[in-house]
Image (cartoon, rainbow, N blue to C red):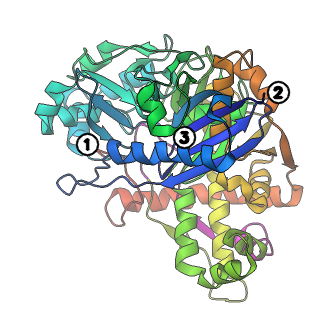
Amino acid sequence: MSAYLMAIDAGTGSVRAVLFDTEGNQVGVAQREWTHREDPRWPGSMDFDWVHNWELASGCVRELLGRTGIDPADVAAVSTTCMREGILLYDADGNEIWACANVDARSNDEVGELIRSNPGLERELYRESGQTFALGALPRLLWVKNKMPEVYDRAATIGMFNDWLIYRLTGVLAVEPSNGSTTGIMDLQSRTWDPSIAERCGIRTDIFHEVRECGTLAGTVNGHGAADTGLAVGTPVVVGGGDCQLGMIGVDACLPGEAGVFGGSFWQYEFNTDSGATDADCRVRVNCHAVPQVWQYEALAFKPGLVMRWYRDGFCQAEKEQAAREGRDVYDVMNEHAAKVPAGSYGMLCCFSDVMDFIHWTHASPTFTNFQLEPDRYDKYTFYRAILENTALLVRGHIDLVREATGNEPDELVFAGGASKSELWAQILADVTGKRVKVPVVKEATALGAAILAGVGVGIYASPAEGAHAVVRWERAFEPDAAAHEVYARMYPEWREVYAAQLALAEKGATKAMWRAPGL
């Protein structure tokens, strides 16, 4: 009898169910897009609709089982993963009563309140939790306390979205440390809740439920879960983790010293360490890995994939039409033209995403600069290539940032996520960083990581590292071109200088920042 492992992945823009065999081959996928609406009363809010979104998630599972024809009894285990930072509150009866998605930014007032009450508190908490107020749960919980006191008083438990998926399947509610640590209310070393952090922020200390380690058995699919999804009653459900942590498992990067770059709507540079020590200057995030006794330095870049989508939809209608005629991906058409533009885009620079500064996190106004009025060189493909180069330059900045904090950098990079489908982007990443860039066969590494954890939980793999090493395969490696690397080595300090000047304009209000953390 064949055995299969299922991952349910609740991302920022969509939810997916993905099925793998035990050798790591993707058997099928079903996906639904979803949106997180702003409450018009609260600018910057990003509400999570748990009723409709569960219908979408469970519908993906039903569709996947139907499309593949797999007998539900042959699903050996299920695990879950999701966007980090999104939180739900439950009442004493286990009903969801409030939820927000990951980049919810309604808590400006509350960040200001926390900073005014104790100017040194954010740095103090960062050293314990690896998090600042920028994305963590503390300002959001304080917002609920201030703006929705009736919800705050009813709240009995806080949870994350991957745990919510398990709860819907099994009725078991518990939080795991890889995503739970992104709340900023966990101690990095003990990998569990630290209620004293909440207390110092004026938040209740009685809403923190059980913590279970990633890869352990959470429970089994109950009658309600089976009716909603089509899974068999009794199917084991294994504790999963945050998307980037499971992504690292899905690219066989489970050990200290290994690094990965994940390219999608947001880009993350992840570097594994054997210590939960934080950065003295609070510039970079530190999370628990989904592998016990391993931690991750994480440098985030906001919106590279969204910038690409904007440029495609705003300027590349002809390429979209060509791609539709030829049955191709529009980005492949755009990449063919951009590959003919020399490294460095004739000296043109652009500013979108910046190198992370977690304690004061903002981005300059979007900018193209240093181009000439010469249409034979500075056409739309040069501008497009400059966007690719901007993202690779900030990855170099993130490698430098993490090296300054830890004293270490990797010898090579693993590149996964939707962006890794672009051979041009992968080559530019290798040329800018001067490092070998490996691309796995399975680009959607997060779902594969969840499937590996599912297998660990039922004994198919002995550990996450052993499971990953057994199933992850490589499609291609990109070696840096020496001449292109020299061009980018000269370009990088110029880009940092231009970005600093553009950021200064945004900081004083002369231009509008592309993104700014709440409270800044």
Secondary structure under tag 1 reads loop
Earlier in the chain: of badge 3 and badge 2, it is 3
Q: Is residue 271 left or right of residue 8?
A: right
Label annotation for residue 107 = 1
Label annotation for residue 75 = none
Which residue matches tag 3?
Answer: 9
Residue 207 is situated, as x and y percent measured from the top left of the image, at 27, 19
Residue 466 is situated, as x and y percent measured from the top left of the image, at 78, 20
Label annotation for residue 470 = 2
- Tell me if residue 158 can be seen: yes
| Towards the viewer: 375 or 152 | 152
Q: Point out the stretch of residues depicted in magenta.
A: 337-362
Q: Is residue 211 above or below residue 300?
A: above
| Amino acid at the residue labelled 2 | Ala
Q: Tell me, yes or no, whether the two marked residues, 1 and 3, touch with CB atoms within 8 Å.
A: no
| Amino acid at the residue labelled 1 | Ser
